[in-house]
Each structure stands twice: as structure tokens, then as C-alpha cells.
Image (tube, coloured by chain):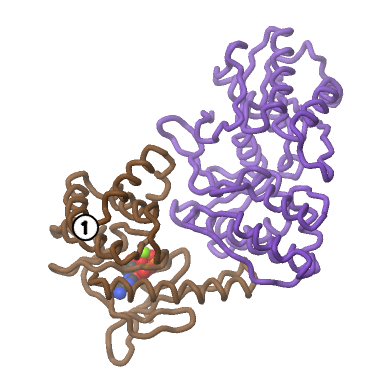
Chain colours: A brown, B purple
Amino acid sequence: MRQLSEGAEAKVFETEIFGVKSVVKSRQPKAYRIKEIDEELRRTRTKKEAKAMLRAKEAGVEVPGLLALGKFSIYMERLSGKLLKDTKSKVSYAKIGVMLAKMHAANVVHGDFTPANIIIDGEKAYVIDFGLAEIGESVENKALDMLLMKRSVSQKQYKELASTYAKTYSDSKPVFARLADIERRGRYQIRSLA
Amino acid sequence: MLVIGIESSAHTFGVGIVDNGRMLANEKMMYDVGSRGMIPAKVAETHVKNASTVIKMALDKAGVTMKEIEGVGYTKGPGIGACLQIGQLSAKTIANALGVGIVPVNHAVAHVEITKHESGLKDPIALYVSGGNSQILKMADSPFKHYQILGETFDVGIGNMLDAFAREIRLKPAWGSTVAKLAEKGSYVPMPYTVKGMDFAFTGLLTYASSLAGKKSNEDLCYSIQETSFSMLCEATERALLLTNSDELEVCGGVAQSTRLQEMLRCVCKEHGFQFGAARNEYNADNGGMIAYVAERMLKDDRGEPLGRCDIQQRYRIDKAIVV
Ligand SMILES: Nc1ncnc2c1ncn2[C@@H]1O[C@H](COP(=O)(O)OP(=O)(O)O)[C@@H](O)[C@H]1O
Ligand SMILES: [Mg+2]
């Protein structure tokens, strides 16, 4: 298996399953914590990530197809295309605004909504990495999704994205209000390191 | 430059003396927290009683006289107002009598800086863990040189959380060290775990562990609350190290005295081949030496303040303090 990446929690490998080109995202054990905590965290987070992916898909958001679920790993469809942060082609931020709106309307908060977690393949945009996702109505968390993306793109791109988000998501007003709040509070800078 | 530093943000009245970065004395007297907890007025009263004794102890230890002192530093905050005032007053009195420069110092900056100095690390991520604070920090250059907060507790500091739990099961609280003692013989009971990116929260854990008091053995509860909270700190810290591409970590503050926490953080670093450093425990506990150390550097950088502007600030956040 060729390793594609190593994050803070998981490694991602290229593989094949049922003859389909796929990737497996596997949560790694951490030697610093006791086995009981380690396995419980990896197990529940793997499940939670898969659940959020499925829920986003149901909401009409493009995500990699889920192929199989292990105790600590998720097998999913391997996408071609490039990460938004690496792509040089012209990208419709209007489309990304719609994606986020659909997720939030279904109460899926992504938790790490940055150009490192969107794959662009031709006309299509996919959301990946639901590793920090939460299912819930929290306006704060939704605003943080928006903020993270806002800080990673140009002003013009953000405007495009925000405008389709507002049009698509009927409950977007409180999210924008909270976003302004958080920006006034100040310490949000640090979340943008991803 | 011979500089005296005074620390009084909580239950310790500490006095340190440095000369060109060399620590000549680091003396202290402490208010006995016991089972009463911290009653600010009582602690301040004790500091008043101890102040001149500790200052004299430090001068004797350093082998210098008060007249030779060339600069003064004191803790401006964060801390308990009534306590901070005693150190501030002592410092201003000395500076005024001697006619030398004086500089207010951020307590958290002092912990991070003395640990950096002691460990020899260049540009570490710092995990600052004390009674009231739990933060993950990194040096940033703009708009001025300061420690940026990468992550922190959403609610209480880890030390206070462990102490509150100790009180709950009728142990004498001491920044987690009594919990640590019992934990040695415990086994694991599942507990709630809350990390969000590089931030974390402890009250859910505290409430849950307290609700099990009497139902599970104290040993098991201490073990589980400690392993869970330390794992949270380690996860957030590891994420910070990776996201910032850092390869050095220091731990500082009162809870940095925990051998278990140090062991876990060392393990995080070993996995990635990162450097790990901590100071000797006399600097992890509150102390005047670290204040003197930072004060000397600030005074040399011309950061002294006129007496009239030597204030205290209970919630003096580390990211508001200029570091030189
Ligand atoms: N379905 C996929 N198809 C193709 N590449 C993927 C897929 N999922 C992840 N990757 C690659 O693996 C990397 C890490 O995956 P991600 O889910 O973002 O994990 P992490 O939580 O470590 O960031 C991505 O940046 C991408 O390059
Ligand atoms: Mg990712």
C-alpha cells in the first residue's frame, strides 16, 4: 500500500478493495496514552467520521463513496483530481458555498473546512476528511467552518461562497452574526493553521 | 545587571536574584493552602508577613546587599489581585528607595522563558499547565514579539480541576500531586474526553469523576481522571506541533512537575523525533527567579516603566505581553 499522507491522527493509504481503486484512512495508535483510552477514541472517532460522511452524502454533498468500515479504518472511493489548496484550475466558490450550506442544513459541521480538505476534479468539488466533524445544531461550530474557509481564501472568493451559502441555507443569518462575533472576540486566528 | 524579581500571583511569595542571566538566589515562602482552599485576603496577609523575610533570604543567598541591586521586576499578572498587590508594592518600594528601573512581568511568559533557558530549546511549542491556566503557546513576531495562544482550556485550568477533584474525595489538594499519588495504584474507568482541535475542556470530566466518588475506588478515579486529562493535553499539543511544523516542545508551570505528564509528552516527542524539555521543579512551581530572569532582559531592552505605570492586571493574557 502506498501511503498518501500522515496526519495528526490518521494515515491514508492507496489500496484496492473489491477491485475498486480506493483509499483507506486508518487511525493510528498513540503510545503516550493507555490502551483503554487509545482504542476507545480511535473506535468512536472512526465511526463518527463515517457517519458524518454518510450524512453529508444524504444531504446531497459530493463526498467519496464509503466502501467499508473497519474498527479503526475507513475504506473509501479514491478520487482523482487535486486538493483545492494545490489546484491551479479555476474553481467555482459558489459551488463550495452550496456544499457548506447543504451540510449545515443537515446539521453536519465539518470541523476542518479548509482548502486542504476539498478535492477538485474537473467541474466537481468533493469534501473529504470528516475526522473532526460533529453532528449538531451548534451555530458556533457552523460559524467556525465558515471562518476557517474565509481565512484561507481571497476576499472575492469568500464573497462568492458566502452569497450562495446565504441563498441555499435558510438559517444562515445567525451563522453570519456569530461569525462576526467570533472575529471580534479575537482568538480565532489560531484555528487557521491547518 | 543585578536584578531582583518578585512573584506573588497566588500562594507563593518568591524572590529571585539574577546577574547577567545567572541565578544567584531563588527563595520563597508559601501560604499553606491546606483544605481551606485559597482565601485571597488570607493569602495576601501571609505574603505581607513573609515579604521582607524572603527578600532578605534572597539577598543573603546571593551574597549581595540591597544597595547593589540595579533593577527590579515583579509579576503584573495573571493572578489574584490581592496577592499581586503585595509583590507590586514590595517591588515599587525597592525601586523607589534605590532609584533603579522597574518592570512589570507577565507570569506565564516568565514560566515559558525560564524553561526555554533551562532546557536550551530554541523555538519550542510550550505547554503551560498550572492551577488556573492550560495553554499551548508559540512565539509569534507580529505585531510585536509575543506568545500566541494556539490552544487552551475552554473552562478551568488543569491544576484547579485536579485540586477540585481532590477536595471532592477529601484529599488535600496540591496541584494534582495528591491525585498522582493515589493514581499509582488505580485502574481505568471510562471518563468523558473533550478535545476540539487544539483546545480542550475539563469541567465535564470533573463533574463526571465527582459523580462517581464513593462508587468507585479513589485510586481508580484518580488514575482515570489523570490519564484522561493528560491524554487530552497530549493530543492537543501533538496537533499543535504538527500543524506548526515545530520540532521542539517544552512543558512548564506547576503541573509540569507531574512525572506522568512529562513521561507522556516525552513519548509524543519521541514518536516524531522531536526535542523535549522541562525545567527543574523549582522553576515549574511559582518562583521569583523566573521573574528576575525576564525582568533583567526587559530592563536591558529598555522596557522599564515609570513607577506610576507599574500596575497589576488579574487577567493579563500572555498574548498581550511583549517578549524580548
Ligand atoms: N477519497 C480520497 N481520494 C483521494 N485522496 C484522498 C482521499 N481521502 C484522502 N485523500 C488524501 O489523503 C490526504 C489526507 O486525508 P484526510 O482525510 O484529509 O486526513 P487527515 O485527517 O490526516 O487530514 C488528503 O489530503 C488527500 O491527499
Ligand atoms: Mg485533511
- Count the marks: 1
- Residue A66 appearing in the image: yes
Q: Ligand 2 is located in which of the four quadrants?
A: bottom left
Taking B252 as reference, is A95 left or right?
A: left
Q: Position of residue B130 (x, y in %)?
A: 67, 44
Name the spot of residue B47 as percent of width and height, x first.
80, 26
Please name whichever residue, B152 or A31, is drawn nearer the observer in this view of the structure. B152
Relative height, residue A112 to residue B143 (above, below)? below
Image quadrant where residue B80 sits: top right
Q: Residue at x 57, y 69 (%)?
A: A30
Which residue carries the number 1 mark?
A97
- Which residue shows up at 83% across the image and 50% down it? B172
* Kind of residue indicated by mark 1: Gly
Of all chains, the one bearing label 1 is: A
Crowd tier of the residue under label 1, counting other residues whose Cα lies within 10 Å: few below 14, some 14–19, many 20 or above: many
Classify residue B65 by image quadrant: top right
